[in-house]
Amino acid sequence: MRDMFLIGGFAIFVVGLVLVLLSSVLTTHISRNFWVNNYSTFTLSYHLNSGDKMECRVTVLGGDNYIKIYIRDPLGVYIPCPGPVRGEEDFSYTADVSGVYVLCFDNSFSGYSKQVFFSMDVIPALAGSPLPWMLIFMGLIIVAVRYWSYK
């Protein structure tokens, strides 16, 4: 009976480890470099599933190094995330619903064109959850308890 617990604990550990390794493979990295003309808006569109997380970095150069960024979700709701950006900023957003999300880089208020360096990691819902790490921890505890109970 103890061997079954040891095997079960090891199996839980392996499943958690596989999920952690898959999460790094499933993460998508996107980098773009573009200009946003004066008095205009530039958009990028990406499909996200519910629970997916965007981790973004934006660097703005030119003029006053200032631009407004917001996200439009598939339902048409505007999310001021992160809002006004001056210079460089990191931000993240987790998708509430599945569909196409539009990132809007708004320079409509400025007479200066801006160069934008944008990078984004899209982390799938499972990869961003604590479940794989919980499975690894739980598997290690089961294996450790059963291993030391043999002595």
Image: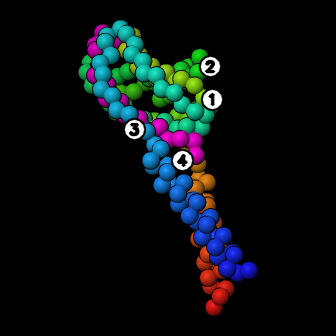
Between discs 1 and 2, the one toward the N terminus: 2
Quarter occupied by residue 31 = top left
Mark 3 in CB contact with mark 4 (< 8 angstroms): no
Coordinates of residue 136 in the picture (x, y in percent): 57, 63
Which amino acid lies under the numbered mark 1 shown in the image of this protein? Answer: Val
**Magenta part of the chain:** 109-126
Within 10 Å of disc 4 (Cα), the crowding (few <14, some 14-19, many 20+) is many
Q: Which residue is mark 1?
A: 97
Q: Of callouts 2 and 4, which one flags the residue occurring earlier in the amino acid sequence? A: 2
Task: Judge from the rendering whether residue 61 lies leftward or rightward of residue 24; answer left or right.
Answer: left
Q: Residue at x 52, y 57 (%)?
A: 18
Residue located 53% across and 41% down the image: 124
- How many angstroms separate mark 2 from mark 4 (CA)? 25 Å
* Residue type at tag 4: Ala
Q: Secondary structure at mark 4?
A: helix
Gap between marks 1 and 3 measured at Cα = 21 Å
**Residue placed under numbered mark 4 in the picture:** 127
Using the image, tell me which numbered label, if any, was put on residue 29. 3
Dots 1 and 3: beta carbons under 8 Å?
no
Count residues near mark 1 (Cα–Cα under 10 Å), then give few for <14, some for 14-19, many for 20+: some
Residue 125 lies within the magenta run: yes
